[in-house]
Image (cartoon, helix red, strand yellow):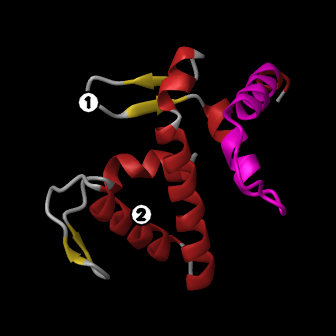
């Protein structure tokens, strides 16, 4: 969740050391560069940083591609700024699926929904 919170600041970076000037662009290329820069700065082991950045971008891509489905189920809210607010239980579920040793070729959004609901039910127990 710390990485998710950090993205509020990261998405406004106009310059990165590795990729140079990005300006105010909010396209896929610029945002990907910002994420890679952030993770490279966050981890000493650069291989780990790249793996974490890739995982983070895959999770965001998956949620973005399935946002309308998860919105209907109450796990994603589209904000006025065209950003998405994602329920922590959904983030946990997607993270779990994307870090499985044998990640499935196709991630079934209905199964992810069920897993998120299970995490949501367990939250008060933690």
Residue segment shown in magenta: 93-121
In this view of the protein, which residue sits in the foreground, 106 or 51? 106
Question: Whole-percent x and y of residue 92?
Answer: 69, 40
The label on residue 51 is: none
Element type at mark 1: loop
Q: Which residue does the numbered mark 1 point to in the structure image?
A: 81
Identify whether 59 is placed above or below 50.
Answer: above
Q: Position of residue 50 (x, y in %)?
A: 55, 75
The residue that appears at 78% across and 29% down in the rendered structure is: 119
Q: Position of residue 36 (x, y in %)?
A: 43, 70
Membership of 101 in magenta stretch: yes
Rendered image quadrant of residue 83 = top left
Determine the image quadrant of residue 72.
Answer: top right
Q: Is residue 45 visible?
A: no
State left or right for residue 116 relative to residue 12. right
The main secondary structure of the magenta stretch is helix
Does the residue at mark 1 contact the one at mark 2 (Cβ under 8 Å)? no
Q: Is residue 74 magenta?
A: no
Near mark 1 (Cα within 10 A), the count class, few <14, some 14-19 or many ≥20, is few
Q: Earlier in the sequence, mark 1 or mark 2?
A: 2
Q: Is residue 14 left or right of residue 37?
A: left
Q: Where residue 115 appears, x then y in whole percent?
A: 78, 31
Which of 15/115 is in front?
A: 115
Answer left or right for 65 relative to 94: left
Report helix, strand or loop for mark 2.
Answer: helix
Q: Where's the C terminus, which quadrant?
A: top right
* Residue depicted at 60% across the width and 83% down the height: 47
Mark linked to residue 35: 2
The alpha-carbon separation of the residues under discs 1 and 2 comes to 20 Å
Q: Is residue 72 above or below residue 109?
A: above
């Amino acid at each position: 969740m710390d990485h998710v919170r950090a993205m509020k600041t990261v998405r406004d970076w106009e310059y990165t050391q590795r990729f140079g000037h990005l300006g105010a662009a909010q396209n896929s290329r610029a945002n990907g560069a910002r994420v890679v820069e952030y993770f490279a700065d966050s981890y000493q082991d650069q291989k780990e940083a790249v793996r974490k950045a890739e995982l983070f971008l895959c999770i965001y891509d998956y949620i973005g591609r399935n946002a309308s489905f998860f919105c209907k189920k109450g796990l994603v809210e589209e904000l006025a700024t065209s950003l998405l607010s994602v329920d922590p239980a959904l983030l946990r579920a997607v993270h779990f699926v994307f870090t499985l040793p044998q990640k499935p070729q196709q991630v079934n959004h209905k199964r992810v929904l069920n897993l998120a609901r299970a995490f949501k039910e367990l939250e008060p127990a933690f």
